[in-house]
Image (cartoon, rainbow, N blue to C red):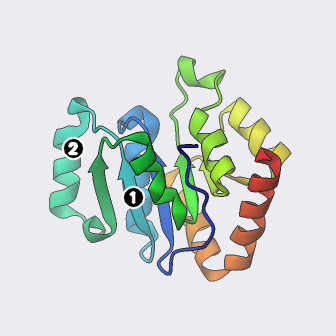
Amino acid sequence: SLLTVSTELNKVPTAIYIGDVRRSRGLFTILEAAEKAPHWNFEIIGNLSALDREAVDAWIAKSAAVDRVKFHGRLAPKDAWKFAGKAWVGLTLLESTPAFVEAVPSKLYEYMSCGLATISTPLPRCIELIEKSNGGKIAASSDEVAAILNGWESNPNEILAIRSAAKDWAS
């Protein structure tokens, strides 16, 4: 009941990340992808790790993508999930740590339940779920994330089919 279903695509292609905002959760992969996907907006919702604050501040000071990346901080779940309403894709870009190798991030399930396509890192359980559902793509780097995003921007029918498959699987 807290999740907002994505019923339409925002005019500007939009990727969201909801969760702990830190390096091991793909923060810098997202920021690098933002620089390589120049027509996409990125909504980052969650508390920024104090350990990453200085590096994020340095990125903000120098990046040409800064106007397209919004940090919203921690929000109540219902408010956080409102960003899914018109987003195109959810991001789950976990680093390959021992804790993440065997896990499926809850965000992957939540994004699919919202009807979002997902881009995930190539962790075994994520690969398995993405392949079974056809609800997203796997990317191992910011270059691959950006290539997928740029491809979806130029071919929105592909992302619409993936979003539909994600929602069907979640149902």
User: Quarter of the image containing the N terminus?
Assistant: top right
Whether tag 1 and tag 2 are in contact, CB under 8 A, the answer is no
Give the SS element for disc 2.
helix
- Compared to residue 22, the image places residue 5 above or below, namely below
Image x and y of residue 59, in percent: 23, 54
Name the N-terminal-most of marks 1 and 2: 1
- In depth, the one of 141 and 78 nearer the eye is 78
Farthest top residue? 98
- Compared to residue 121, the image places residue 16 above or below, namely below
Instruction: Quickly name the residue at label 2.
Output: 55
Left or right: residue 11 versus residue 154 is left
Would you identify the image quadrant in which residue 92 lies? top right
Specify whether residue 24 is in view.
yes
Give the SS element for disc 1.
strand
Left or right: residue 85 versus residue 56 is right
Residue 60's tag is none
